Image (cartoon, rainbow, N blue to C red):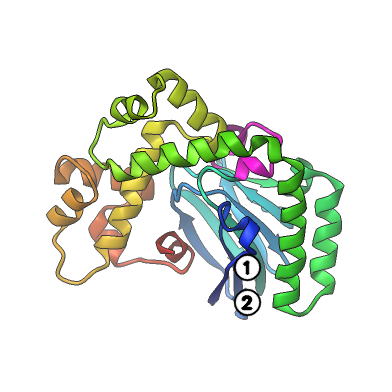
């Protein structure tokens, strides 16, 4: 398995964290679990492999063009065959610039992007399949998203406001910081909650928890760092709270996670 990462054009850099290419030459089937990352993704499947994700009590085939909503709990996936996947990873606040639907309806699932954005996505996918050069594929995808962004410019002011609010929450890592952040931006807590949910699919509390969880993932893999230090440096009140939240997002304890870091969840550390 191999991940490669690519930067978007300058106009898209405030909205897209990176493009990535995931390739696997093995036909071996495997299972994995996707953890919450706080970011939404679009994925264009360009290989012959099949992905499935757990919906309810059944594993269902993922579509050829995927829109991954906010993942708020561990989500089991299965894979078989050879893969070539071109992905777009948005910043937490920015997928709403490219979509007309309420973001929260996509939570905890891989939706069909063609159903969401219509025929242009079908044409884009066909184009990407016809191109063999990775850089050219990214150019085509980048142009598609740039055009979509320009068509939704009326959203940009609110999007940037949400970005500043989320940045404030990240910088104030203590628990129960939402009232303080709302006050610093001159808005009510209720309006802050509404604004963030509309543009991210997350409540401020959920975003805060996922942000602390991501911090803990970056720290927990470092050598000679005790779990107590990971907990406090990630903004948790105590180690037991950290372990409880970590298990709710991964299904396993921090110690068990260290023994089972997967290729898919290495994306969270990027």
* Quarter residue 204 falls in: top left
User: 139 left or right of 94?
Assistant: right
Q: Which residue is drawn at the image coordinates 66% and 66% (left, top)? A: 86
Is label 1 in contact with label 2 (beta carbons under 8 Å)? yes
For residue 80, the mark is 1
Magenta span of residues: 95-108
Q: Considering only vertical position in the picture, is 92 above or below 137?
A: above
x then y, percent, for residue 65:
73, 55
Characterize the local packing of mark 2: few (<14), some (14-19) or many (20 or more) Cα atoms within 10 angstroms.
few
Q: Considering only vertical position in the picture, is 222 above or below 268?
A: below
Asked whether residue 48 appears in the rendered view, the answer is no
Nearer-the-camera pick, 219 or 52: 219
Q: Considering only vertical position in the picture, is 172 above or below 219?
A: above
x then y, percent, for residue 223:
19, 72
Q: Which residue is drawn at the image coordinates 25% and 61% (left, top)? A: 220
Q: Is residue 100 magenta?
A: yes
Characterize the local packing of mark 1: few (<14), some (14-19) or many (20 or more) Cα atoms within 10 angstroms.
some
x then y, percent, for residue 183:
33, 24
Label 2 residue SS:
loop
Nearer-the-camera pick, 29 or 33: 33
* Label 1 to label 2: alpha-carbon separation: 6 Å
User: 225 left or right of 31?
Assistant: left
Question: How many numbered discs, if any?
Answer: 2
Q: Which residue is drawn at the image coordinates 80% and 52% (left, top)? A: 121
Q: Is residue 152 magenta?
A: no
For residue 200, the mark is none
Q: Please identify the quadrant where the C terminus is shown.
A: bottom left
Q: Which residue is mark 2?
A: 27
- The numbered mark, 1 or 2, whose residue comes first in the sequence reads 2
Q: Which residue is drawn at the image coordinates 28% and 40% (left, top)? A: 172
x then y, percent, for residue 20:
59, 67
Nearer-the-camera pick, 115 or 75: 115
């Amino acid at each position: 398995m191999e991940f490669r990462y690519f930067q978007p054009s300058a106009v898209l850099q405030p909205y897209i964290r990176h493009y990535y290419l995931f390739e696997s030459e093995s036909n071996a089937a495997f299972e994995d679990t996707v953890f919450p990352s706080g970011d939404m993704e679009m994925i264009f499947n360009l290989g012959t492999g099949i992905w499935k994700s757990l919906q309810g009590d059944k594993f269902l085939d993922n579509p050829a063009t995927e829109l991954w909503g906010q993942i708020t709990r561990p989500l089991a996936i299965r894979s078989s065959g050879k893969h070539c996947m071109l992905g777009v990873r948005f910043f937490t606040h920015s997928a709403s610039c490219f979509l007309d639907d309420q973001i929260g309806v996509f939570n905890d699932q891989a939706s069909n992007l063609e159903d969401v954005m219509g025929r242009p996505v079908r044409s884009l996918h066909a184009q990407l399949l016809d191109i063999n050069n990775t850089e050219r594929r990214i150019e085509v995808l980048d142009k598609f998203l740039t055009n979509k962004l320009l068509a939704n410019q009326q959203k940009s002011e609110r999007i940037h406001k949400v970005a500043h609010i989320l940045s404030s929450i990240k910088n104030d890592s203590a628990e129960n910081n939402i009232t303080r952040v709302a006050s610093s931006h001159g808005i009510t807590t209720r309006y802050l909650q509404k604004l963030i949910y509309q543009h991210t699919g997350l409540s401020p509390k959920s975003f805060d928890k996922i942000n602390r969880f991501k911090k803990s993932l970056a720290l927990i893999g470092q050598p000679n760092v005790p779990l107590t230090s990971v907990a406090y440096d990630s903004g948790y009140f105590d180690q037991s709270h950290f372990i409880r939240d970590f298990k709710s997002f991964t299904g396993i304890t921090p110690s068990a996670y260290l023994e089972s870091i997967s290729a898919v969840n290495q994306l969270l550390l990027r």
